[in-house]
Image: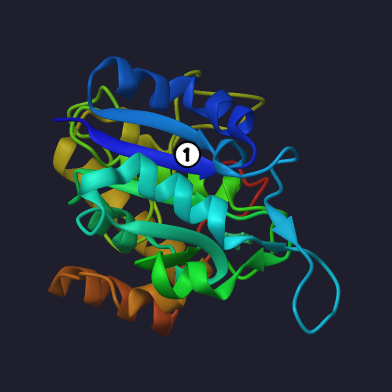
């Protein structure tokens, strides 16, 4: 059964455009996911189908009215209300991480509700949403980019979505570490080489090199991640060597001639 995403938005074309390309497109064709994009305005009453209004108590900006959002979600989910997570995209939500993406793959269907304007009427949060997600500590003009980020990160975790048997298992954050550096042909570009070990064909050495580079990169760029990562005794020894300076923490610097010595 495909994982079904229902996106509720005032900008359906923006959402559809992204779902029609690349991995999301292929995952739909392969029956791994389905996308249904719903225009909240279609569920607004009256000649003008208004979806926003002034905030009670005054102040700037407009607020998304509750009626069209409730009507859209309740109509689309129907009898599945109560069984499907209804996720608001908002800067006030819990922070989206790879672990949250992994958690969301466990559901058969996900409703993603995008806000525009200054925010949602609080009753949407309290009485309709079952979850709220933020993709980072910054404010976007609307939830669409956030909903697409969530749909994309969840989809690529589903078996078969990447068309590669190893799937997303080596991605940055998959193991709690940043990913190791990648190289492809040519073996020398503008005098910059490729680390010898990658050309050696020695799989155990390549695996160890990749692991150490992932550890080194995480130690330098995101030491906060190391505390939560899944580390072997050998990993811990390597990090101790980085800390003590016995291993160069930065690795080869930009512009250095890598792989020639
Ligand atoms: N809507 C506006 N800003 C957002 C953010 N950072 N994450 C999720 N939804 C948003």
Instruction: Name the quadrant containing residue 36.
Output: top left
Pick the front one: 61 or 234: 61
Which residue occupies the foreground of this view, 99 or 15? 15
Q: Is residue 62 left or right of residue 71?
A: right
Report the residue marked by disc 1: 259
Q: Position of residue 184 (x, y in %)?
A: 45, 25
Q: For the image shown, how many numbered marks are present on the structure?
A: 1
Q: Position of residue 174 (x, y in %)?
A: 29, 54
Residue drawn where x is 35% and y is 61% of the image: 177
Question: In the rendering, at what x and y percent does residue 123 appear?
Answer: 51, 73
Ligand 1 picture quarter = bottom right
At x 40% / y 58%, what residue is drawn? 87
* Label 1 element class: loop
Q: Residues within 10 Å of mark 1 (few under 14, many from 20)?
A: some
Task: Tell which of 109 and 145 is nearer to you.
Answer: 109
Q: Name the residue: 56% across, 33% down.
A: 15
Q: Is residue 163 visible?
A: yes
Report whether 56 appears left or right of 203: right
Question: Going by the image, does 258 lie left or right of 45?
Answer: left
**Residue 12 image point, x, y percent:** 59, 32
Residue at (23, 69) in percent of width and height: 235
Within the image, what quadrant is residue 39 found in? top right
């Amino acid at each position: 059964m495909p994982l079904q995403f229902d996106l509720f938005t005032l900008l359906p074309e923006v959402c559809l455009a992204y779902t029609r390309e690349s991995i999301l497109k292929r995952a739909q064709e392969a029956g791994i996911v389905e996308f249904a994009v719903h225009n909240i305005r279609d569920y607004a009453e009256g000649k003008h189908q208004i979806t926003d209004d002034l905030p009670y108590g005054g102040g700037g900006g407009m607020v998304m009215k509750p009626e069209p959002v409730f009507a859209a979600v309740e109509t689309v989910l129907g009898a599945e209300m109560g069984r499907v997570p209804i996720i608001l995209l908002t800067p006030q939500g819990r922070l989206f991480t790879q672990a949250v993406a992994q958690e969301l793959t466990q559901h058969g269907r996900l409703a993603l509700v995008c806000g525009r304007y200054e925010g949602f009427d609080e009753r949407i949060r309290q009485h309709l949403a079952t979850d709220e997600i933020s993709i980072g500590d910054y404010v976007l003009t609307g939830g669409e980019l956030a909903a697409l980020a969530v749909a994309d990160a969840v989809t690529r975790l589903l078996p078969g979505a990447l068309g590669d048997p190893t799937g997303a298992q080596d991605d940055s954050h998959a193991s709690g570490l940043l990913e190791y550096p990648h190289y492809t042909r040519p073996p020398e570009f503008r005098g910059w080489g490729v680390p010898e070990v990658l050309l050696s064909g020695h799989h155990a050495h390549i695996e160890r090199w990749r692991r150490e580079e992932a550890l080194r990169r995480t130690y330098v760029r995101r030491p906060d991640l190391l505390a939560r990562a899944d580390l072997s005794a050998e990993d811990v020894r390597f990090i101790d060597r980085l800390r003590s300076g016995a291993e160069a923490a930065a690795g080869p610097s930009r512009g250095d001639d890598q792989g020639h010595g």
